Image (spheres, helix red, strand yellow):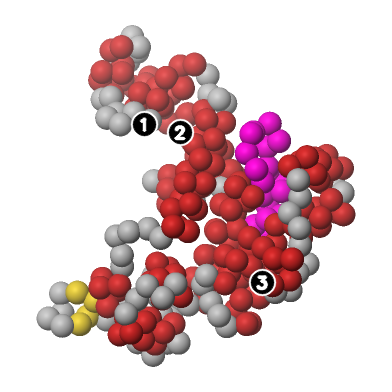
C-alpha cells in the first residue's frame, strides 16, 4: 500500500469497469489481488482524510491505516446494483474510521474538526490560529471559559459556514444515506413501509391516531408493527454504515 500522501496520489484511479470488476472478484471469489488493486487505487482517500486531522507523521500513518480499513469494509459491502462510484460510497467508511481514530488520539483535548480545517486552510486570523495550534498540542482546552465565562474558545472558533470540501463531502454522504434508506425500506412489507413513511419520513410526521384511523388499524397494533419495522431498519442501516447516534 502507498506509505504517504504523495505516494497514494501517484497511483492511477481505476476506470469504472475496472473498479466494478475488482469489487466483483473480491466479493464473489475472495480475490485478494483484486482487493489490493481496488484499495491502492483509492488509498488517496484515506491519506487525504487523515491529513486533514493531523500533521504528526506517526498519527498520520495511524489515521490513514484506519481509513484503509474503511476502504476494505466498503469493498465488502458495496452494492454493485447501485449506480454510484466506489469512491463516493467508500467516503462514508473512510471518514468514520479516520474521525473515530482521531478522537482517540485527541482524547485529552477536544479540537473541533472545522477549527482544524479552517486553520490548515489559512482561514483563521493569527490569534485563532495560535489558539487551535495550542489546543492540538495539549497546551489549552478549547472548552475552557473565557471573557465573562459565558462562552468558550470553542464557541468563538466554530463557523456556521461549510467549507467547499465539507459541502462536497456532505452532499456525497447525503446521497449514500438516501440510497441506504431506500434499500432498507425495500425490505419492509407494504404495511410496514407505509407506516414508516407516514410516521418517520415526512417533513411533518402524522400522529399515531391519524395513521391508525387511515389504515383501519388499532393503535396498539400500529405501535407493534412500527416497532418491528424500526428494529429491522435500524439493524440494516447500522450494517450499511449509519452511525448509531443518527438513529436515535
The residue at 62%/39% (across/down) is 84
Question: Secondary structure beneath disc 3?
Answer: helix
Q: Position of residue 41 (x, y in %)?
A: 75, 57
Q: Is residue 138 magenta?
A: no
Question: Secondary structure beneath disc 1?
Answer: helix
The residue at the far bottom in this view is: 139
Q: Position of residue 176 (x, y in %)?
A: 54, 42
* Image quadrant in which you'd find residue 98: bottom right
The residue at 51%/40% (across/down) is 175
Q: Are marks 2 and 1 in contact (CB under 8 Å)?
A: yes
Q: Which residue is the site of mark 1?
A: 200
Residue stretch rendered in magenta on the structure: 68-86
Q: Position of residue 136 (x, y in %)?
A: 44, 82
Q: Which residue is the site of mark 3?
A: 5
> Which is in the foreground here, disc 3 or disc 1?
3
Q: Tell which of 229 and 39 is nearer to you.
A: 39
Q: Give the left or right position of residue 132, taking residue 156 as reference.
A: right
Q: Earlier in the sequence, mark 2 or mark 3?
A: 3
In 3D space, how far apart are the residues under numbered discs 3 and 1 (Cα atoms)? 42 Å
Q: Which mark is residue 230?
A: 2
The residue at the far left in this view is: 148
Q: Earlier in the sequence, mark 2 or mark 1?
A: 1
Question: Secondary structure beneath disc 2?
Answer: helix
Q: Is residue 72 magenta?
A: yes
In 3D space, how far apart are the residues under numbered discs 2 and 3 (Cα atoms)? 41 Å
Q: Are marks 3 and 1 in contact (CB under 8 Å)?
A: no
Rate crowding at label 3 as few (under 14), some (14 to 19) or many (20 or more) other CA atoms within 10 Å.
many
The residue at 73%/54% (across/down) is 13
Rate crowding at label 1 as few (under 14), some (14 to 19) or many (20 or more) other CA atoms within 10 Å.
some
In 3D space, how far apart are the residues under numbered discs 2 and 1 (Cα atoms)? 10 Å
Q: Tell which of 59 and 17 is nearer to you.
A: 17
Amino acid at each position: 500500500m502507498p506509505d504517504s500522501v504523495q505516494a497514494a496520489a501517484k497511483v492511477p484511479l481505476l476506470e469504472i469497469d475496472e473498479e466494478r470488476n475488482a469489487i466483483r472478484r473480491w466479493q464473489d471469489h475472495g480475490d485478494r489481488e483484486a482487493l489490493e488493486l481496488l484499495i491502492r487505487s483509492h488509498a488517496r482517500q484515506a491519506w487525504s482524510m487523515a491529513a486533514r486531522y493531523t500533521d504528526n507523521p506517526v498519527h498520520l500513518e495511524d489515521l490513514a491505516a484506519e481509513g484503509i480499513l474503511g476502504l476494505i469494509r466498503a469493498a465488502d459491502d458495496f452494492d454493485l446494483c447501485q449506480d454510484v462510484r466506489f469512491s463516493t460510497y467508500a467516503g462514508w467508511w473512510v471518514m468514520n474510521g479516520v474521525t473515530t481514530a482521531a478522537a482517540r488520539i485527541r482524547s485529552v483535548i477536544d479540537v473541533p474538526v472545522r477549527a482544524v480545517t479552517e486553520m490548515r486552510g489559512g482561514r483563521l486570523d493569527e490569534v485563532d490560529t495560535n489558539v487551535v495550534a495550542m489546543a492540538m498540542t495539549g497546551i489549552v482546552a478549547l472548552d475552557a471559559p473565557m471573557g465573562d465565562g459565558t462562552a468558550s474558545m470553542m464557541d468563538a472558533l466554530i463557523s456556521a459556514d461549510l467549507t467547499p470540501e465539507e459541502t462536497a463531502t456532505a452532499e456525497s454522504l447525503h446521497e449514500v444515506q438516501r440510497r441506504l434508506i431506500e434499500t432498507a425500506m425495500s425490505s419492509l412489507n407494504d404495511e410496514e413501509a407505509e407506516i414508516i413513511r407516514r410516521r418517520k419520513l415526512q417533513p411533518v410526521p402524522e400522529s399515531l391516531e391519524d395513521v391508525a384511523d387511515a389504515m383501519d388499524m388499532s393503535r396498539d397494533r400500529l405501535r407493534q408493527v412500527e416497532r418491528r419495522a424500526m428494529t429491522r431498519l435500524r439493524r440494516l442501516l447500522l450494517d450499511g454504515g449509519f452511525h448509531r447516534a443518527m438513529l436515535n
